[in-house]
Amino acid sequence: RFVVGAEGADFFLVYAKTDTDPKAESHTTLSLFIVDRTEGVSTEYIYGLLGTRGGGAGRLKFTDVKVPKENIILGEGEGGKIFYQMMVPERLTTAAGSLGSARACLRIATKYSTKRKAFGRAIKNFQAVSFNIADSITLLDAARSIVLNTARTIDAGAPPALQRRLVSESKKFSTKSCWDVINKSMQVMGGIGYTTVYPIERILRDSRIGEIWTGTTEIMNLIIQHEYYKDILSEKWLGRDIEKDAIDSDAEEEKHFG
């Protein structure tokens, strides 16, 4: 389900479970294949989407499909490794792509606010409008910063666990912040922003998927807290106990842990 390119792609990347041993480690049970669109590969349904309608997303059905041995990528059992590596650039690309959409909408709204007049004044002179612009600038700059920091950290060869956490933070924060910027831009535009006279309505529809695909915001939260707990409770953090900085740090009886 939800296969991008289901409508017209000539081949697909397919993860399949190739080790059914219940004792096998989960990350070694998957393999990745290149599956050509042959007679046994059919597109059963094409979804009507709110936005991003050019991808031809749909549901595929495989019927007695045979895949040549040479179509396996890296080797049997390497699918899990590939998946976790692939998620880093895929999620970071989603985070970075959202920035461009939000910036475009903010520029349109800012320009519009200098031309549209109400009560004889350009609407940028009303704080109800200009504060929306200010909030949007702040969100966009913050999102750009976290995405750039993550990209630089990954390029510097950060440990995989740190990469997973930072990428998850970037995708979560950027997609949510950029959605807010786009929404605020439409609010500044008023009714005309809801029409097809300006592209904001289309960008808004396209951008909603950012918080869903390549891992939902909820999954990003799951990864963030998991990696942070694992890091903060590791041995390297067991040196100086900051709790001892409190004046009454020795009042152990008051530290109830239920």
Image (spheres, rainbow, N blue to C red):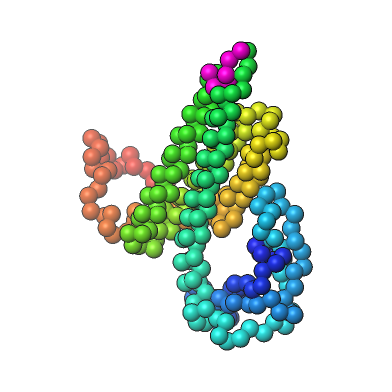
**Image quadrant occupied by the N terminus:** bottom right
Please give the range of residues in magenta.
Answer: 120-125
In the rendered image, residue 228, in percent from the top left (x then y), is placed at 39, 53
Choose between 220 and 61: the one closer to the eye: 61
Location of residue 250 with respect to 149 vertically, above or below: above
User: What residue do we see at 62% from left, 50% from top?
Assistant: 209
- Relative placement, left or right, of 53 versus 163 is right
- Relative placement, left or right, of 240 versus 116 is left
User: What residue do we see at 52% from left, 45% from top?
Assistant: 100
Residue 72 appears in which quarter of the rendering?
bottom right
- Relative placement, left or right, of 124 versus 240 is right
* Residue 158 can be seen, yes or no: no
Taking the magenta stretch, the answer to whether it contains residue 85 is no
User: What residue do we see at 56% from left, 76% from top?
Assistant: 32
In the rendered image, residue 21, in percent from the top left (x then y), is placed at 56, 82
Residue 231 appears in which quarter of the rendering?
bottom left
User: What residue do we see at 65% from left, 52% from top?
Assistant: 52
The residue furthest right is: 44
* Residue 246 can be seen, yes or no: yes
In the rendered image, residue 7, in percent from the top left (x then y), is placed at 72, 65
